[in-house]
Image: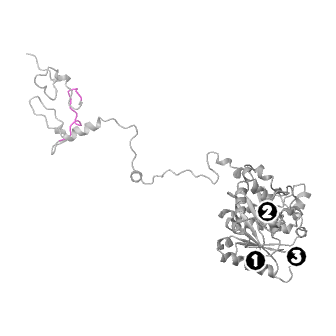
Amino acid sequence: MSEPNHEATSAYPAPAGDNTDIGDIDDFDDAPSDGRTDSHEFPATHGQHPAVAAQPVGHDEVPPVVPEAYHRQHAAARQPMPAYPPQAPVDQQQRMMPIGHQYPQQPHRGRHAAGPNGDLASAHLIRPVKRRPQSGWRKAVYQASGHLINPGESPEDRRKRELIMRVNQPLRGCYKIAMLSLKGGVGKTTTTTTLGSTFSSLRGDRVVAVDANPDRGTLSQKIPMETTATVRHLLRDADRITRYSDIRAYTSQGPSRLEILASEQDPAVSEAFSENDYRRAVDLLEHFYNIVLTDCGTGLMHSAMKGVLELADSLVLVSSGSVDGARSASATLDWLDAHGYGELVKRSVAVINSVRPRAGSVDLDKLEAHFAARVRAVCQIPFDPHLEEGAEIELDRLQEATRTKLLELGAAVADGFAGQ
């Protein structure tokens, strides 16, 4: 009788009726089929040492009961592993970091490093250059040295540049300014022309001044006349105006690029210029112009004044440096407050215009303080021989002090652009 072959003996007997070779039987759950049972394959049962639990079982012995946890463990092990394991939460990662671990720091971006080419910013590469002087001994030294010696800007030049920047503040839509005075002869029409010329000479947008004086206004005489058309002709042909070139045929333009729309010269006809006519005119102009100045008459009760005040974004109240002129201007503010235009008064700019070479004994600083308590800003315009002529106005012929004060007036009015 031959000896039994123990090398092919499996740890578990083959079931009855199965003709499969015992050596080919795989252990359940894909266990190794090499005839051995490693100690790590089966966990020890409760109260049993792992070495005892790993003993091979003979054919006549009952196999130990395999815990359900074993099946769950191996079933989970056969699941495909994700390509990238999930990352632990930040607080858990920090607890897992060893003591003394240095966390990576975010790269520091410089002041001008807006991107990969931040080092090539103009402010970073170009050396600051002194601005050229515009006046005084600084300009003389700069020109005499052949531009080799640059003393830089004077405080006056720097202030002038800042005023020009304020005048050039951005403006959305059309800004309407009403020029008002109850007393004649205070320079209201002249102030309208000089203020409009200051805007048009410095800004790139279009500026027009409308003569709404019902008593034969003189606004059209402040610049060279290019056409005899008036606001009446514009309203008559309003349906045919579709482009800027169409409306340009009804205005005159001065050297500063200021355009003027004249009023009717016949007093009997101009009296018929009603509130509705003014509204129609402004509605047409605001499609082609960014700033519209209205030179009003001396009365507050004429037909067009109600439309002027209701459409105005800002008010410029002109007064002379005399006592009666100041009283008239103050009475105008009182009337506006009493008739529901209090907000317009708060947005107003008062102008104290010196129409005579000498101010006399009137303290203009006290006048300025009086109006400053009621309006947004106050500007003093000094006497200028060129303005006294009463003819066409050219900014280049004005004295330097007058031009500086007009810059201050333009800057004060332009400060209201942001609140439109």
Residue 93 lies left or right of residue 21; in this view the side is right
For residue 57, side relative to residue 361 (left or right): left
Q: What type of secondary structure mainly makes up the magenta span?
A: loop
Where residue 313 appears, as percent x and y from the top left, is 68, 65
Could you say whether the residue bearing mark 3 is in a helix, strand or loop?
loop
Name the residue at 77% across, 79% down. Answer: 328
Look at the numbered disc 2 and give the secondary structure of its residue: helix
Q: What residue type is labelled 3?
A: Arg
Q: Residues within 10 Å of mark 3 (few under 14, many from 20)?
A: some
Can residue 104 be seen?
A: yes
Location of residue 337 (image quadrant): bottom right
Q: In this view, does 150 lie above or below 65?
A: below
Q: Is residue 366 magenta?
A: no
1 or 3: tag closer to the N-terminus: 1
Q: Are marks 2 and 1 in contact (CB under 8 Å)?
A: no
Q: What amino acid type should be assigned to the residue bearing mark 1? A: Ala
Q: Mark 3 points at which residue?
A: 356
Label 1 to label 3: alpha-carbon separation: 18 Å
Q: Give the range drawn in magenta.
A: 32-44
Mark identifier at residue 329: 1
Question: Residue 391 placed where, x, y %?
Answer: 89, 65
**Residue at label 2?**
196
What percent of the width, then of the height, locates residue 148? 87, 55
Amino acid under disc 2: Gly
Task: Please state, as top left, top right, bottom left or bottom right, where the N terminus lies in the image.
Answer: top left
Q: In the figure, residue 397 lies in which quadrant?
A: bottom right
- Which badge, 3 or 2, comes first in the chain's sequence? 2
